[in-house]
Each structure stands twice: as structure tokens, then as C-alpha cells.
Image: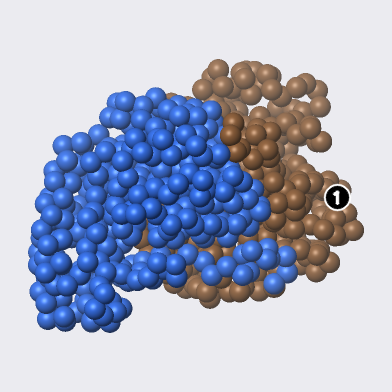
Chain colours: A blue, B brown
Amino acid sequence: MIGLRPNIAKMAGYTPGEQINDPAVVKLNTNENPYPPSPRVFEAIQAVLTGDKLRKYPEPSGISFRKAATRVLGIDSESILIGNGSDDILTILTRTFVPEGGRIVTLTPSYSLYKSLAEIQGARFQTVAFGPNWSLPAVSAIPPDTSIFFLANPNSPSGTFIDIQKIAAFIEGLPCPVVVDEAYADFAEDNALRLAKLPKVIVSRSFSKSMALAGIRFGYAVAQPEIIQEMIKVKDSYNCDVLSLTAAEAAIQDTAYVTETRSKILATRERMQPALEALGFQVTPSQANFLWCRRSDRPVQPIYEALKQQRILVRYMQYSDYGEGLRISVGTDAEIDRLLSCLHDII
Amino acid sequence: MIGLRPNIAKMAGYTPGEQINDPAVVKLNTNENPYPPSPRVFEAIQAVLTGDKLRKYPEPSGISFRKAATRVLGIDSESILIGNGSDDILTILTRTFVPEGGRIVTLTPSYSLYKSLAEIQGARFQTVAFGPNWSLPAVSAIPPDTSIFFLANPNSPSGTFIDIQKIAAFIEGLPCPVVVDEAYADFAEDNALRLAKLPKVIVSRSFSKSMALAGIRFGYAVAQPEIIQEMIKVKDSYNCDVLSLTAAEAAIQDTAYVTETRSKILATRERMQPALEALGFQVTPSQANFLWCRRSDRPVQPIYEALKQQRILVRYMQYSDYGEGLRISVGTDAEIDRLLSCLHDII
């Protein structure tokens, strides 16, 4: 093809999880929230569903959302950048910090989008294995010419969480900007927001999981204002639309609702683990809204296929440098009962 | 700043038009549609405002929108790529075809985002002057090492339109992919969709102007399926949200409504030109929803400022290689009456 960049030609492209538009399917494959978003989200969207709001461009910096986030999180609004989902934040970070031929480094196994971002940018991609029990590796394992380091915490697919003080010490020794990808942080016991005060840390957040708003695409970054200013140059001016901004502003302020759905999800996660273990899975203790399930007695892909036959979707994941497993989202109690019953029949 | 790419550090960043959230302001600065979107858009959004739709990820390829577009435009759905606004399409194209150190070429004066895209990508940016009367330059003026050529048609700020047959002949001689940026095509007498059958042409469309949906961020690209396949690798998987996709699908199918608002806008444009000329402006004949107004007797920035005092926003534009002018969007008849009356007092 005329003019196509060779790095684009040779890359395969990121494969998102299957999105099946069938309400009869139990969807436990992309870590969506099993509960709907806050009722305030619907009220807020209704209030801006006017001809004038839809026909005009949104406010490009999302100032109204940022002010709400400031009140909830105690972070200065100049330290917040809005994104069209946290994938948009990760893309903006890549374009801000990674030159062609640069190097993106992450741990493995982790979020596979990081590799795609490196390929699109024409950069090298390098993974470093986790230490024992999903701990951080030695700082010396990170190449000195790293352009950016992505750390998903809680990690996917493992659901594991690394202590924030350990992350702070690790970052100290790194030669590059570090992104703490906190898509699942609202399900964990702690988070890294306080590290965003450091001059080389960017925390990324998603509204697709704890806020139950995967459909509206919203995320944000937190970092020092000097970093945010550079990221603003790279983002599309109008990367977030008026309905998403409105939904996000309403959702982040309804902390009582988020706490309530979070509690339900954590309670379900609590009983899923022993139930899956009783079925012969090795289940990694999770601080996210999913469980990473492996087996040593048999391959898991046929189990994924058999569940799909029963209209239950989980995520089969296979890493060349790690092996395979099933990543199972925490659904409602009824969904998990159906999952466990089907697994009982299959195994 | 640690790790910041030098091209990002030295760029200024694209400056979007002022977005003032005050209904009392007559907003004629960013070429929004003065009429609301189709009533069907509101019905369609209401129908998907459910917990299940918001909490789940959207279908990543926008297949439902693409099928609707296929019926309306007579273009195969495999030839269509969805975008989070046409700026997202232009970003995806840049990342697909322009390496670091590559070269983006466009005519001047034109859409200033093209320069920002080059800067973000770490590419060179080169402009070539229009021929006489806003015609195409000689093909030989385009450097042989051009990575991508952006042609806005109708052009902004001029509103001028280049005959599609002339564009076809011009493209024939170019060494690179050519983007025909048709953000304003619905206000023109013809369009370049039929050129998207050529193996190096990509047509870009926006829903922010003729569809009156600047607030929801939607655009699309039309090109050969082989090109679309490469662009899919570069786009964020979930670049369009469920509400925007729904709105776009409803809007594109309500062709009667688009025809009706278009007619009103063209009628207003028709009477604006002589009225502005009577006030001493040189007004370029426009095939878009705005008019490019210049003066040789006095600078226009004070006129912009005086209008702003009267709560009328127009766009003051200044090009180092061309000069200055006011780009005035076609508003409702009442808005334009107020504009003309204010201009009469000012001048």
C-alpha cells in the first residue's frame, strides 16, 4: 500500500474482548460492572439532551468534570487531563513520551494494549517478568533507555496488587516517566494517587469498571500540571463529548453509590475464589473485579469454549512468555451462580 | 521534563475556537449548525439510555452505524471507519501514514490542525500556496517525499470549493496518500466520495456541521477496505461511545431533515454575502457554512473585538503566509440580522 508505515503494516492490531449485543449472554469477559451506573448519571444526561448542547462543541478541557473531581479526590484541577476512555490517556502518554525507535517497558503478563501502542508508535516493546508472587522486579531489570514504563496496578490478568510504598521506591530508581494504570484501583485496598505528586508519575483512571460507564468512554490522568500541559498539546481538542463529560461528572460525585456497588462486587469476589478453587482452578487472590484462573491438570481453552456454548463469556488469555488462563469478571450473584453451575457440569 | 519528546516540548499546541457556554452569546466562530440535530437523534439516544447499554463496552467497529451509512451513501460498510470526530480520523491517518521525520503537506491557508498533527508526530510540515482563485497548485509543487497530503474541500477559512474532476487529476500525479477533508461537503455542490474508490484516497467526514452534532464527537473515513484495515489497527478499539454511535446512526438516516436545515443555511449564506460586502468586506464566495471576510481599508481584529463586546463571537484568523480575516459562521436569520446590525454600528 502506498505510503503505509512499515510498523503499521507488520503489526497485527490489538484484539478487544468480544462484545456481544445479546442480553441473554452472561458477559464475564471484559470486566464491565455487573450493576448499572448511578441513577444520577441518567438524570444528568437527560438535563443536557438539548439541541443547543448537542449542536455545539463541548468545552475542550472538561473543566466542569475536573472541578467535580477536585472536590471528590482532593486533587488540583490543573493536575487532571480528561480522556476518551483510559485507552485514550495511554495513547496520549505514548505520543507525548515515546519517539519512534523509543522503548516501552512493562511487566508480563499484563495489559496487551501496551504492546500495540509501541507498535503503532514505531517503538520497541520489552517485557520484564514479575518477581515472586507478582512482586516488582529489580529496578536493574528495566533498561536505562526506557521511554516510558507502564505498570497496571491492580494488574490484569492477575488481579494482583503491589503495595504503593514499594511502587514509590521502585519509581525512584527508574530513568523514565512511569504510568500507574489504575483502571481497577477502585476495587483495591489502596491507590497511587498520592504518587502523582512526583515529577515523573502519571496515574491513569477509567470509568469503565467501578463507575459502570464502559459505554460512554471516559477516563482521566492525574499528574503534575507541567506534565498535563504537555499532554494537552497531544490530545484531540474535543476528545470527550458533552454526554460523556456530563455522565462522568455525575458518576464521580455519587460516591455512596460507587461504594455500594463496590461492596457487592467485593462480596461476590470473596465467594467466587473458594468456589472456583473447589472446581480445580488455581485462583490468584484478586484486588480487581475479576479472577485469574489457571489449571495444571488440563488445558482451559476447551472450558472457555464449553462455557461459550452455554452462553457464558469469559476471557481466554494466552501469553507466549507465561502460559494460559481464564480471566473471569465478577458478575452479579445470579450470574456467578450460573457460571459455577455450568463449570460444575463441564469439569 | 524527564523523557519528554523534543517535538512536543517545542510545539505550541492547536488552539481550538472559543467555546463559551452562554446562551446569550451569538456563536458564529466554530461553524456549528445553528439548528438543532434531527428529532430522531433524541429518540434514538433515549432508547439506549439504559443501565445495560451504558455499563457495557460499545461494539468497536460501529457496524450498526456503518450499515446505515451504507444504505444512505451507497458505500460498502468495509470501506467505512468510525471516528471520535473527524479530528480523530485525521489523527489516525497521520499515525498510519506519517513516520517521525516524514512530511505532511497541505495548501495554505487551510485547517491549522494539520500543522499540529505534524508536530505531534515529529514530522515536517509544509504548505503550498493555492493557485489563482483558490485553485489547485501545480502537482510539481508537492515534494516527492510527501507522506500524506491533506486537502480541505470546501476549504477553511476560505469556504472555497475545488471541482472534483480537477482533484482527481491532481491526485493522479501525487506520490502519496491524499486525504480529502470534507467536513463541510454537505454545504457544497458536489463531493469526493466517488474518489474513495482510488487506492490512495481517503475521504474524511464530520457530524459536527451539517448533522448539528459537534457535541457528541463523530466523524468517519471512507477509503478502500485495505486502507481501512490498516487504520483499524491504529484507532483506539472503543473510540466511539454508544450514545454517539446511536446519534450518528439516527442522524445520517434522516436525510429529509438534513436537506431542510441545509436549505435554510444556504439561503442565509446567500443573503449574508452581499450584506457583508455592502459593509465594506471582501467576501470569498463560499460553498461551506461560513464566509471568509477580509478588508483592505482597515485591520479586522478591532472589529472582532467590538463584536465580542456585543456578545457576538466570530473567528479572527491570522496566517503568517497569507494575512488576516474574519471567518463568520452562517447562523440563523435572527443571529445574522443581529450581526449585520452590530457591524453597521461598528463600521
Location of residue A182 by image quarter:
top left
Which residue is found at the position 29% from the left and 44% from the top? A185
Q: Is residue B125 placed above or below A302 in the rendered structure?
A: above
- Front residue of B48/A230: it is A230
Which residue is found at the position 26% from the left and 80% from the top? A298
Which residue is found at the position 39% from the left and 48% from the top? A136
Location of residue B322 by image quarter:
top right
Q: Is residue B150 placed above or below A16 in the rendered structure?
A: above
Estimate the x, y position of residue A132 in percent, counting from the top left. Answer: 34, 54
Q: Which quadrant of the figure contains the C terminus of chain A?
A: bottom left
Q: Please state the chain letter of the residue tagged with numbered disc 1 in the rendered image.
A: B
Q: Is residue A228 visible?
A: no
Estimate the x, y position of residue A256 in percent, counting from the top left. Answer: 16, 37
Estimate the x, y position of residue B310 in percent, counting from the top left. Answer: 54, 19
Is residue A295 found left or right of A244 in the rendered image? left
The amino acid marked with disc number 1 is Gly
Q: Which quadrant of the figure contains the N terminus of chain A?
A: bottom right
Q: Is residue B15 visible?
A: yes
Q: How many marks?
A: 1
Location of residue A24 by image quarter:
bottom left
Estimate the x, y position of residue A166 in percent, counting from the top left. Answer: 36, 38
